[in-house]
Image (cartoon, grey):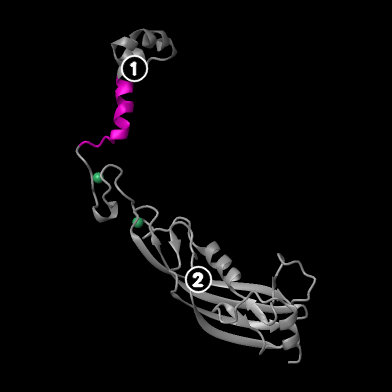
């Protein structure tokens, strides 16, 4: 490859070829139609997560991908498998799961006119898989993960996990947060509200039945 030394001089290298998610396309070359398949595993980068669910940093992420040289650059197509850890949105129990995502990204050659936000870009002969992997994983993570589809959540009164204690109930079944409201209601129907009740009685028969 005669162009290798030249391109490395022309473009300031931001990418570190030793970084696990940086892939060197040197072996692929630039002849359109050439293809290369790669299988490798990377440690999960940090912050691959949303609120309740994420990929533990450093956990192995096997990647299976194909690189194709096209006219304007390199098309990367592949899949990645991650392990997931998080907590149930209803009962807060820990959850372990796994996720398989697919991705495809066109990395244009460094000298291409394509807008950087329309496509990835090769730096020299290197492509950075991290943004594309991050997008694919984060978009696939569940916002409301549950430990089991019919998780009953927690008892509002005592916090016990309802799936663990079927038929769970309290003698005083009134939630303390409702008690204040019930007290107000009692006042309204009491003797002090009598006048108001009489005036509204003409709209229905309920007052006669009381
Ligand atoms: Zn749960
Ligand atoms: Zn309870």
The answer to whether residue 30 shows anywhere in this view is no
Question: Is residue 206 within the magenta segment?
Answer: no
* Left or right: where 47 falls relative to 154: right
Q: Secondary structure at mark 1?
A: helix
The CA distance from mark 2 to mark 1 is 60 Å
**Residue position marked by numbered label 1 in the rendering:** 188
* Left or right: where 194 falls relative to 67: left
Question: Is residue 181 within the magenta segment?
Answer: yes
Q: Secondary structure at mark 2?
A: loop
Give the residue at x 52% y 84%.
40
Image location of residue 114, percent across then percent down: 77, 69
| Outermost left residue | 171
Could you say which disc has been placed on residue 45 in the image? 2
Image location of residue 129, percent across then percent down: 60, 74
The image quadrant of residue 189 is top left
**Picture quadrant of ligand 1:** bottom left
Judged by its main secondary structure, the magenta piece is helix
The image quadrant of residue 190 is top left
* Left or right: where 200 falls relative to 125: left
Q: Which residues are magenta?
A: 172-186
Tell which of 3 and 143 is nearer to you.
Answer: 3
Tell which of 206 and 76 is nearer to you.
Answer: 76
Image location of residue 175, percent across then percent down: 29, 36
Give the residue at x 54% y 85%.
39
Q: In front: mark 2 or mark 1? A: 2
**Label 2 beta carbon less than 8 Å to ligand 1:** no
């Amino acid at each position: 490859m005669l162009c290798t030394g030249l391109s490395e001089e022309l473009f300031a290298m931001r990418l570190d070829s030793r970084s696990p998610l940086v892939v060197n396309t040197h072996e692929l070359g630039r002849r359109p139609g050439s293809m290369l398949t790669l299988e490798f595993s990377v440690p999960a980068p940090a912050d691959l997560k949303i609120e309740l669910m994420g990929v533990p940093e450093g956990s192995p992420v096997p990647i299976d991908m194909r690189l194709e040289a096209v006219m304007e650059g390199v098309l990367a197509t592949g899949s990645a498998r991650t392990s997931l850890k998080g907590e149930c949105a209803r009962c807060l129990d820990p959850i372990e799961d796994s996720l398989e995502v697919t991705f495809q990204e066109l990395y244009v050659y460094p000298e291409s006119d394509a807008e950087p936000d329309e496509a990835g870009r090769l730096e020299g002969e290197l492509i950075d898989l991290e943004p594309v992997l991050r997008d694919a994983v984060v978009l696939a993570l569940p916002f409301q993960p549950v430990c089991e589809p019919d998780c009953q959540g927690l008892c509002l009164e005592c916090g016990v996990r309802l799936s663990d204690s079927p038929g769970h109930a309290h003698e005083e079944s009134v939630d303390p947060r409702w008690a204040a409201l019930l007290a107000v209601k009692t006042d309204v129907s009491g003797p002090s509200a009598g006048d108001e009740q009489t005036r509204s009685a003409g709209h229905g028969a309920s007052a006669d039945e009381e």
